[in-house]
Amino acid sequence: MASSSSTTSTSTWTNQRSRFLSSSKDVLGSSSTSISFCKKPNARTAQNSTLCALHTPSILQFPKQSVGKTSTCPVELPSSSSSSSSSPVVQQNWNLIQKFAAMALDAVEDGLKAREKLQTLPKTADPNVQIAGNFSPVPEQPVRHCLPVAGKIPEHIQGVYLRNGANPLFEPTSGHHLFDGDGMIYAVKFDNGSASYACRFTETQRLVQERAIGKPVFPKAIGELHGHSGIAKLLLFYARGLCGLIDVTQGLGVANAGLVYFNNHLLAMSEDDLPYHVRVTPSGDLKTGGRYNFEGQLNSTMIAHPKLDPVSGELFALSYDVIQKPYLKYFWFSPDGKKSKDVAIDLGKPTMVHDFAITENFVVVPDHQVVFKMSEMITGGSPVMYDKEKVSRFGVLDKYAENGSDIKWVEVPDCFCFHLWNAWEEPESDEVVVIGSCMTPADSIFNECNEELKSVLSEIRLNLKTGKSTRRPIISPENDVNLEAGMVNKNLLGRKSKYAYLAIAEPWPKVSGFAKVDLSTGDTQKFIYGDEKYGGEPLFLPRDPNSEAEDDGHILAFVHDEKTWKSELQIVNAMTMELEATVKLPSRVPYGFHGTFINAKDLATQA
């Protein structure tokens, strides 16, 4: 499909203030908006561009600060200055020494930024690339009820659909990666055929402190921590902490990736912090309850993809550390929220473990070739790197193991699965079957690469008896498409499933539709969102947990029209693959990450 971003271009910030696209009148209800157009690239820029929609933005925008004007935006969104001569931010409760320290550190930071401007940012850290077009942020939206609906919302859809995303509060002043933005949750609540919408920032400690100071001061893990400037920014950050200008003890995370509803708690997660408890109000609004440590039981980070067993009701999770051993820990929670002890899993080096899988009796842990090497910053590189000497492998561990030494490792060479969709056991062959999307180049999300990224839906078989593995593409090469972000029927997680519902990430990383894939045959049915319409992760919502047909349910997906600059929620019948309803949304929904659905019964019992 054609994309309005199919022509290579580079956007630039026009000034130090934030700004809106002219069509954002629909977003904020204000006609006081401005429009900004991109510049044409020179020949060198066009020649070196990566084959990726994210690297070919057409429009870059940022929410504008509301000053003395009536707006439907419920909060003011301050814009930090990128000027090296900007005045330092001081707080009234700082003493004289702290004020001088703040001025000195701000001056050092301004000098650092001035030097950075003399260098070209890699595309993976360039905000003009990473948050352009509909990847750019939006302001909070208070609840809007009785939204226009085309078609009929299926009767079984009662509750709230929520999706997480990265939505930076402040205009970046240096490097910024798509994953670095502050967490924002977008929510559509369904009540007997009607729908409401709201979106709110998750009030992380990071966001609260930066908003109080008036500018970004926490380091961005991917976009900024490169080379010597990354080391300098870490030192600045901890210097501010030592001076009492910020509190570095309450977590650094953005809570922008995953969402899970467990033990009456909606949790927003990113793998660099504790989860955050968010509550859905009766009106459909969202309120942050704060960092959630499971009543004092969790004292480490938790990855954004915990697994909820549909049979036992238990929640299984991992935590990884990039500095000290154990680099990986595994734990689980009983249905009433009681945590197991940590089980240390021995990894030779700190590794990115973004996702994992469960079966009826096991957990399946990937140990891939994307690793953390902090010393790379000393030589000017990124601490997130591809280790060509390492052999990828999967570890299979009993779900209730008390010792990580019992894990069985099976090598799967040259395999990097950012996400795993399901896994199950086949005892007759002593195999564990893993379904995931194998991505190449493995580190291209984090480090600039001119090679076209591919994500191949794959079946990986781990033979626990022989210690050998096999891997095959599920879809034939002539019909293959990039499939990333999605799910199987949640009632079959950890059990053999027939179908997976996955985003068609083309042009990468924008999503033109979703595919319903028969995992045994590779037969694929595609649903395309529409001409110049792009969306995100498809969420499969079963009609009834006792349905005989695995695909008896509906697909929900946020979709954005790049022609009209309006967003909607599409509801598709998963059996017929036909659009049944479209909910027109009152404000733009940026392309984001992962979501969940909480039914009306569970909403009524929230903590």
Image (cartoon, helix red, strand yellow):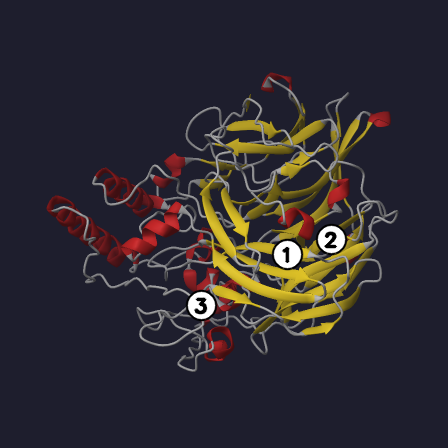
Tell me the kind of residue under disc 1.
Answer: Tyr
Q: Depth check: 591 or 163 in front?
A: 163
Other residues around mark 1 within 10 Å, as few (<14) / some (14–19) / many (≥20): many
The kind of residue tagged 3 is Arg
Quarter placement of the N terminus: bottom right
Image coords of residue 397 (percent x, y): 66, 24
Residue at 60% in and 53% down:
453
For this view, does 473 lie left or right of residue 320? right
Looking at the image, which residue is at 25% across and 53% down? 112
Q: Which residue is mark 3?
A: 44
Number of marks drawn: 3
At mark 3, the secondary structure is helix
Q: Amino acid at mark 2?
A: Leu
The outermost residue toward the left is: 96
Q: Which comes sooner in the sequence, label 2 or label 3?
A: 3
x and y percentages locating residue 521 in the rendered image: 85, 48
Label 2 SS: strand
Q: CA distance from mark 2 to mark 3?
A: 47 Å
Instruction: Give the crowd class for mark 3: few <14, some 14-19, many >=20 residues within 10 Å.
Output: few
CA distance separating discs 1 and 3? 44 Å
Q: Nearer the viewer, residue 260 or 121?
A: 260
Which of the two discs, 1 and 3, labels the residue nearer the N terminus? Answer: 3
The x and y percentages for residue 604 are 63, 49
Q: Which residue is mark 1?
A: 161
Contact? badges 1 and 2 (CB < 8 Å) = yes
